[in-house]
Amino acid sequence: MMLVSNQGVDYIIYITGTLELFSVCWVYGVQRFSLDIEFMLGKGPIYYLKFCWKFVPFFMCVVLVYTFVTYERLSIDGVPLPFREFGRFFQYIMVKFLK
């Protein structure tokens, strides 16, 4: 359980957040998203939000890559966990991510 609570949730949140930002802001488009908000609320979003929607997904991708690059194996009392535990860990992440 320590493996999932220490590292599993972080990766799920990073991947889900990055994919959500990427899909809404870059695939669907900031302009279309702004028009939808204006249609629903009667007034458009401020320019600050549009700026953030354009550039925050890039920085989230950088954070995601940095997280994977600086990954350190989990160890308990100085003893690293066996590699097969990491296979189970990534299997758990993919099952949770794909649900």
Image (spheres, rainbow, N blue to C red):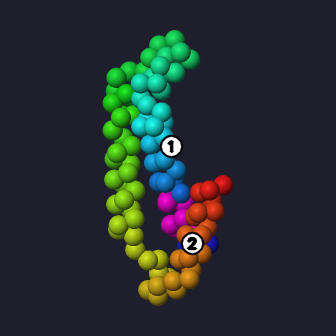
Q: Residue at x 54, y 65 (%)?
A: 8
Relative to 21, does residue 66 appear above or below in the rendering? below
Measured from the top left, where is residue 28 in percent x and y? Answer: 48, 33
User: What amino acid type should be assigned to the residue bearing mark 2?
Assistant: Phe
Q: Is residue 15 visible?
A: yes
* Left or right of residue 8, residue 53 in this image: left
Q: Residue at x 34, y 53 (%)?
A: 62
Q: Secondary structure at mark 2?
A: helix
* Mark positioned earlier in the residue sequence (2 or 1): 1
Q: Nearer the viewer, residue 7 or 30?
A: 30
Q: Magenta span covers which residues?
A: 4-11
* Mark 1 neighbour class, 10 Å CA radius: few under 14, some 14 to 19, many 20 or more: few
Tell me where residue 61 appears, x and y as whole percent: 38, 51
State the residue lying farthest toward the top: 42
CB under 8 Å between discs 2 and 1 = no
Residue at (47% x, 19% y) in the render? 35
Q: How far across and how far down the image is residue 50, in percent?
A: 37, 28
Residue 89 — which label?
Answer: 2
Q: Is residue 61 above or below residue 29?
A: below
Q: In screen coordinates, is 40 left or right of 69? A: right
Q: Which residue is mark 1?
A: 20
Residue furthest out toward the right: 99
Q: Residues within 10 Å of mark 2 (few under 14, many from 20)?
A: some
Looking at this rendering, what residue extends furthest in the front direction? 27
In the rendered image, residue 5 lying in the magenta stretch gets the answer yes
* Type of the residue with mark 1: Glu
